[in-house]
Image (spheres, grey):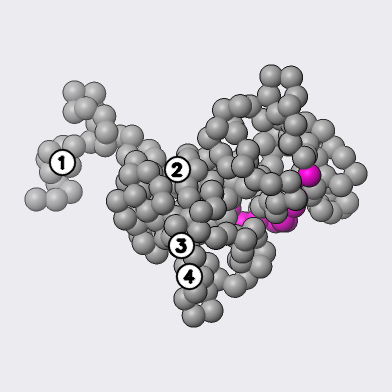
Amino acid sequence: MFTGLIEKVGTLEGRRRNGGGWRLAVGAPFSDDDPLALGESVAVQGTCLTVAALSPNGFEADLLDETLRRTALGSLAIGAPLNLERAMRADGRFGGHIVQGHVDEVGVVAEVAPAGRDRVIRISCTPGFARICVEKGSVAIDGVSLTLTEVGDAMIAVNVIPHTLKATSLDRLAAGSPVNLEADVIGKYVARILSRPASGGGLTEESLRKAGFYG
């Protein structure tokens, strides 16, 4: 599990075929006092990957074709900045929100506009993704935990403060940029429960009314 608070901004060093999948090389300046270990999980641009090999300047991770299909990792140019977050420790601070590192879909930046000291980023997404988002709720964009300021039928928007722009890869985004999107897992469960047919015991307006939640 992750929190969406980026620890380091690494670099995409390479991407090559490896057997039936792909091998991603990541330049990652983690501290020698707490080095990466083989087999540990690292969120790379919001995608949970397993450290498969260590190198003097970072690590390598294996990717499935499905991972490249469902994320923006396959479209990034060599040298692109990568948001990196190691899995949350049990004794760590929970500063963002629950991020699984399971990308729901790739959105496309529709607009990046200044808003005083901040920057507004509007992203086109599918109606299905927008449906499980709520204004003032949480979303992970390229692994960064952000608060939704606007939700439309097929779009979402966030305001990004200068510190977050400086400390993540979000500063590079422009109209047309692909981004990894992960909705709040709580919203996914609620949507799943509500979508089940009444005969299967799912929640409906009628069952909520009978339970006294609204008249």
Membership of 141 in magenta stretch? no
In front of the other: label 3 or label 2? Answer: 3
Q: Which mark is residue 185?
A: 2
Tell me the amino acid under the disc marked 4. Ala
Q: Which mark is residue 113?
A: 4
Q: CA distance from mark 2 to mark 1?
A: 22 Å
Upstream in the sequence, badge 3 or badge 1?
3
Upstream in the sequence, badge 1 or badge 4?
4
Tell me the amino acid under the disc marked 2. Val
In front of the other: label 3 or label 1? Answer: 3
Q: CA distance from mark 1 to mark 4?
A: 39 Å
SS assignment at label 3? strand
Membership of 10 in magenta stretch? yes
SS assignment at label 2? helix
Q: Where are the magenta residues, as a range?
A: 1-13
Count residues near mark 1 (Cα–Cα under 10 Å), then give few for <14, some for 14-19, many for 20+.
Answer: few
Upstream in the sequence, badge 2 or badge 1?
2
Q: Residue furthest right?
A: 56
Q: Which mark is residue 111?
A: 3
Rendered residue at 58%/50% (across/down): 143
